[in-house]
């Protein structure tokens, strides 16, 4: 708890957290737009899904590129990326044609692709020496909360203002971005000049880190995506499965902060292994025993299966310390791509063998990840890499 309070006293970290929350709320808001878009442009379900594909696709593909730019030129444009996403998304309710809407979604996705590695690299340079895992978890949790709040905010705005209510979503992005732009103009994180060659990247631990992140996102995004449909098919009303899906997302946010605090005490690999082992029965209970008790299972799944994202992000950044922006772009871009690919794969299995059987596949996915996690870097290796990290001569001090 002390580490959490210390993180929340870090003004720059909290501002970035709220920026992350604002940005990722668009991911949760897009599906709420579907009914209005279908009616306005006379679309079917497959076609309207192109909006989400354009947003997530452009964001995923562009993140490694923006990570390279962050390593080379610094992260002063973090606030600008947030403004870009907010302003382009705000126009979604005003475009006259569906192709124009898809183009706008793709442009907004580019802003998301820029913000994620920029934000993660900026946060890395703001992390305290003690409680770093907790602080990173607080930042990442902002995005998770944004995804959970997006549908709720979207329902209210669209009910009051119709599809043009998307314009209001510019306000939180603009507020956070204004602070970031002003703060980082004079004290932003600039590019760093390397004065000695970087240490070689340990390839096997890096591959294991990427694989664990991929597995986590396949499981979490699949369960979040299909839970409402599954319970609808089981005959439950929307007032039941809507809060259930929200519980799953919010539990993952709380679990991330808890995992970060534990990692500061016991090490990241130990916490990731423990949560993977605990995730096997948690996912099995959630899928095998549907019903009112699923709210308890959702808390377990969110708190265990979904909590390791910030820890793997920091692992990747430290394994590629001299290319931390690229590491951030790769690991976060992979998170989007894995979800985008994994959900259709699960859907194809569901079409053949049923949705519950397809969701049970995630138990096997989590179990198969446990031996891979044994290859994750330990604290001794990460400490050695931090010691060998190239000295830098920053052109300016980190943002407050």
Image (cartoon, rainbow, N blue to C red):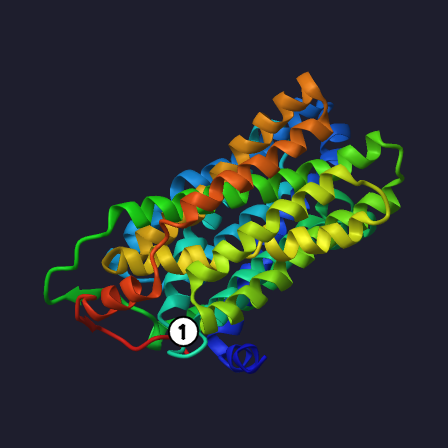
Where residue 284 appears, x then y in whole percent?
A: 68, 41
Q: Decide which of 252, 97 is in the foreground and name it.
A: 252
Q: Of helix, strand and loop, which one carries label 1?
A: loop
Q: Quadrant of residue 343?
A: top right
Q: Is residue 333 visible from the viewing direction of this image? A: no
Q: Is residue 331 left or right of residue 56?
A: left
Residue at image x 52%, y 82%? 6
Where residue 40 appears, x then y in whole percent?
A: 74, 30
Where residue 54 appears, x then y in whole percent?
A: 53, 34
Q: Quadrant of residue 17?
A: bottom right
Q: Is residue 212 left or right of residue 19?
A: left
Q: Which quadrant holds the N terminus?
A: bottom right
Where residue 118 appears, x then y in whole percent?
A: 39, 58
Q: Is residue 91 left or right of residue 77?
A: right
Q: Decide which of 304, 336 is in the foreground and name it.
A: 304
Q: Is residue 29 visible from the viewing direction of this image? A: yes
Residue at image x 26%, y 55%? 323
Residue at image x 79%, y 52%? 295
Question: What number of labels is visible?
Answer: 1
Task: Reply above or below: 264 against 211.
Answer: below
Q: Decide which of 378, 345 is in the foreground and name it.
A: 378
Report which residue position mark 1 lands on.
127
**Label 1 crowding class (10 Å Cα cut-off): few <14, some 14-19, many 20+?**
some
Q: Which quadrant holds the C terminus?
A: bottom left
Q: Is residue 278 left or right of residue 378?
A: right
């Amino acid at each position: 708890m002390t580490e959490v309070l210390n993180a929340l006293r870090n003004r720059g970290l909290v501002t970035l957290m709220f920026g992350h929350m604002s940005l990722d709320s668009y991911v949760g808001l897009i599906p709420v737009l579907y009914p209005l878009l279908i009616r306005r442009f006379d679309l079917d379900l497959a076609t309207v899904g192109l909006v989400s594909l354009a947003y997530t696709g452009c964001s995923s593909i562009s993140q490694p590129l923006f990570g390279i730019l962050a390593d080379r030129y610094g992260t002063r444009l973090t606030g600008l990326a947030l403004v870009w996403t907010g302003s382009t998304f705000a126009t979604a309710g005003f475009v006259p044609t569906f192709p124009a809407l898809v183009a706008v979604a793709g442009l907004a996705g580019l802003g998301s692709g820029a913000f994620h590695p920029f934000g993660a690299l900026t946060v890395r340079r703001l992390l305290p020496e003690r409680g770093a895992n907790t602080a990173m978890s607080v930042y990442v949790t902002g995005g998770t909360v944004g995804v959970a709040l997006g549908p709720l905010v979207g329902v209210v705005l669209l009910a009051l203002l119709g599809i043009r209510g998307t314009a209001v979503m510019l306000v939180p992005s603009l507020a956070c971005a204004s602070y970031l732009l002003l703060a980082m103009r004079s004290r932003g994180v600039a590019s760093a000049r390397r004065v000695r060659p970087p240490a070689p990247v340990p390839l096997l631990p890096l591959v294991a880190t990427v694989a664990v992140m991929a597995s986590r996102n396949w499981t979490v995004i699949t369960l979040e995506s299909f839970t409402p449909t599954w319970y609808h098919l089981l005959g439950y009303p929307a007032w039941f499965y809507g809060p259930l899906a929200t519980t799953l997302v919010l539990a993952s946010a709380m679990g991330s902060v808890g995992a970060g605090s534990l990692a500061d005490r016991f090490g990241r690999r130990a916490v990731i292994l423990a949560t993977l082992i605990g995730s096997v029965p948690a996912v099995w209970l959630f899928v095998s025993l549907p019903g009112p008790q699923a709210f308890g299972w959702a808390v377990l799944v969110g708190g265990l299966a979904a909590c390791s994202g910030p820890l793997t992000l920091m692992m990747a950044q430290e394994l590629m310390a001299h290319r931390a922006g690229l590491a951030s772009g790769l690991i976060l871009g992979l998170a989007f791509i894995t979800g985008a690919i994994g959900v259709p794969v699960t859907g194809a299995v569901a079409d053949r063998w049923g949705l519950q059987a397809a969701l049970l596949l995630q138990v096997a996915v989590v179990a198969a990840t446990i031996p891979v996690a044994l290859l994750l870097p330990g604290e001794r290796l990460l400490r050695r890499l931090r010691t060998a990290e190239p000295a830098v001569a920053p052109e300016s001090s980190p943002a407050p």
